[in-house]
Image: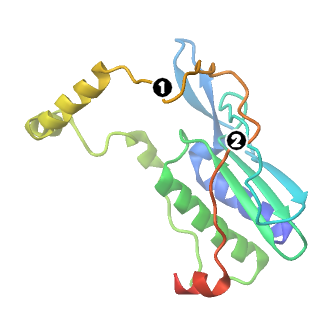
C-alpha cells in the first residue's frame, strides 16, 4: 500500500461524505446537531507488523470530539491489512460498502493505475435532509398501519418482557472502558484459489 496515495484517497473520499466530515455539537436549546469540520482528517494509525491476525483493538468513537471514522493500517512490507472503524450514526452497512468502494477507486486514481472506467459516483448530499424518513409521510404511514398491526403486537410483547441474562452479571456503564480484546471477531482467511472461486 502506497501511504501517500492512500492518505490522499482518504482525504478525497471523506470530503465527499458530509457525516464523515462533521462532529456532533449541542445547540443553544440543548439539541444535538451535526457541525461541519474544516479539513476533516480521520485518525490513520500506521503499523509495521505481521498481517492476517486479529483485528486491532478499537476504542469508543466520541462524535463530540472526532469524526466518526478511523483507520488502522498494518503492513509487513509485502501484505497490508486495512481496518476501518465506522460510527453507525454516520453510515449504515450499505454506506460502509459505498465508502469502501469509493476509497478503493480514489486510491487507484491517486496511485495512477486506475482502469479507464474507474470513477467516483455522483453523490447528492441534499438527500441527507430526508435521512430516516424512507419516503414516508403521515398519509403513507396511516395506510400501512393495518398491515403492520401483527408486527406492532409482537413488538409490544417484546417490550413488555424483561430479558434474563444468560450468565449472572452486572451490566457495565456506557462510559466504562471497552474490554481489552474488543472487537473480538471470528475470522477466516481463504487461500487465493478459494477466493477466486467465490
Taking the image as shown, residue 183 lies to the left or right of residue 140, namely: right
Residue 172 quadrant: top right
- Residue 182 tag number: 2
Q: Earlier in the sequence, mark 2 or mark 1?
A: 1
Across and down, in percent, residue 186 comes to 62, 56
Q: Name the disc covering residue 2, or none.
A: none
Q: CA distance from mark 2 to mark 1?
A: 21 Å
Locate residue 31 relative to residue 133 in the image: left or right: right
Residue at 24% x, 41% y: name it. Answer: 136
Residue lying at the far top of the rendered structure: 29
Instruction: State the image coordinates of residue 164 (x, y, percent, origin top left).
Output: 42, 23
Q: Position of residue 42 (x, y in %)?
A: 75, 47
Q: Nearer the viewer, residue 136 or 179?
A: 179
In this view, the residue in front, 70 or 127, is: 70
Q: Going 8% across and 36% down the picture, which residue do you hit?
A: 146
The disc placed on residue 165 is: 1
Image vertical order of residue 117 relative to residue 76, above or below: below
Please say if 190 is above or below 23. below
Amino acid at each position: 500500500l502506497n501511504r501517500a496515495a492512500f492518505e490522499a484517497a482518504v482525504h478525497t473520499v471523506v470530503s465527499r461524505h458530509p457525516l464523515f466530515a462533521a462532529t456532533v455539537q449541542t445547540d443553544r436549546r440543548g439539541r444535538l446537531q451535526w457541525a461541519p469540520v474544516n479539513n476533516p482528517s480521520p485518525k490513520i494509525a500506521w503499523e509495521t507488523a505481521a498481517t492476517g491476525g486479529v483485528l486491532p483493538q478499537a476504542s469508543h468513537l466520541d462524535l463530540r470530539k472526532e469524526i466518526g471514522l478511523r483507520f488502522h493500517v498494518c503492513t509487513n512490507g509485502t501484505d497490508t491489512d486495512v481496518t476501518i472503524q465506522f460510527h453507525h450514526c454516520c453510515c449504515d452497512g450499505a454506506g460502509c460498502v459505498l465508502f469502501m468502494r469509493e476509497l478503493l477507486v480514489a486510491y487507484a486514481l491517486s496511485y495512477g493505475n486506475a482502469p479507464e472506467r474507474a470513477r467516483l459516483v455522483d453523490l447528492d448530499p441534499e438527500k441527507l435532509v430526508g435521512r430516516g424518513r424512507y419516503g414516508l409521510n403521515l398519509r403513507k404511514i396511516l395506510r400501512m398501519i393495518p398491515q403492520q398491526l401483527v408486527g406492532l403486537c409482537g413488538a409490544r410483547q417484546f417490550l413488555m418482557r424483561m430479558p434474563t441474562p444468560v450468565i449472572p452479571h452486572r451490566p457495565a456503564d456506557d462510559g466504562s472502558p471497552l474490554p481489552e480484546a474488543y472487537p473480538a471477531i471470528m475470522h477466516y482467511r481463504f487461500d487465493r484459489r478459494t477466493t477466486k472461486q467465490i
